[in-house]
Amino acid sequence: MWLWGSVGFIIGNVVLLVILFPFLSGVGIAGGAPRHTDVLGFALVGLVLFGPLLFSSAGVILGCLYGWRLARRRMVQPGV
């Protein structure tokens, strides 16, 4: 379970980085007038703030469930 939970953690964070990379690759620090907040910008801010927590937690939980399922399947022997 720990192995698959760790794999799920890594995969969850990689998925988050893949989702955020196109948005964050063109972000500049200086210059340009401030933009008005739109729905996409609001969703992006929420994803940047809460995404690591959600994706990491979901990855660990799903990985542990997958590991538990594999372990349970190996323990149950047919015909015994």
Image: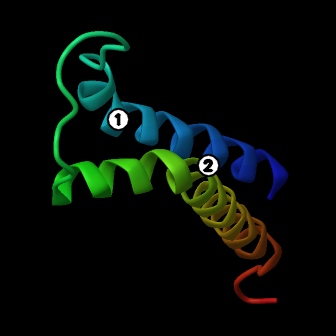
On residue 5, the disc is none
Point out the image quarter for the C terminus. bottom right
> Disc 2 designates what residue?
8
Q: From the viewer's perspective, is residue 23 above or below residue 67?
A: above
Q: Nearer the viewer, residue 42 or 75?
A: 42
- Drawn side of residue 9 relative to residue 55, left or right: right
In the rendered structure, the answer to whether residue 62 lies left or right of residue 64 reads left
Residue 70 percent across, percent down from the top left:
69, 65
Q: Quadrant of residue 33?
A: top left
Examine the rendered structure and indicate whether residue 68 appears above or below residue 27: below
In this rendering, which labeled residue sits more in front, label 2 or label 1? 1
Tell me the residue that label 1 is attached to: 20
Q: In the picture, which quadrant includes the N terminus?
A: bottom right
Asked whether 78 or 51 is in front, the reply is 51
- Disc 2 marks a residue whose amino acid type is Gly
- Position of residue 19 relative to residue 74, above or below, is above
Label 2, label 1: how many angstroms apart (C-alpha)?
Answer: 18 Å
Q: Residue furthest bottom?
A: 80
Please tell me whether mark 1 sits on a helix, a strand or a loop: helix
Q: Residue at 73% across / 44% down in the picture? A: 6
Q: Quadrant of residue 23?
A: top left
**Horizontal side of residue 14 vs 77, given as left or right:** left
Dot 1 crowding, Cα within 10 Å, few <14, some 14–19, many 20+: some
Q: Position of residue 54 (x, y in %)?
A: 57, 60
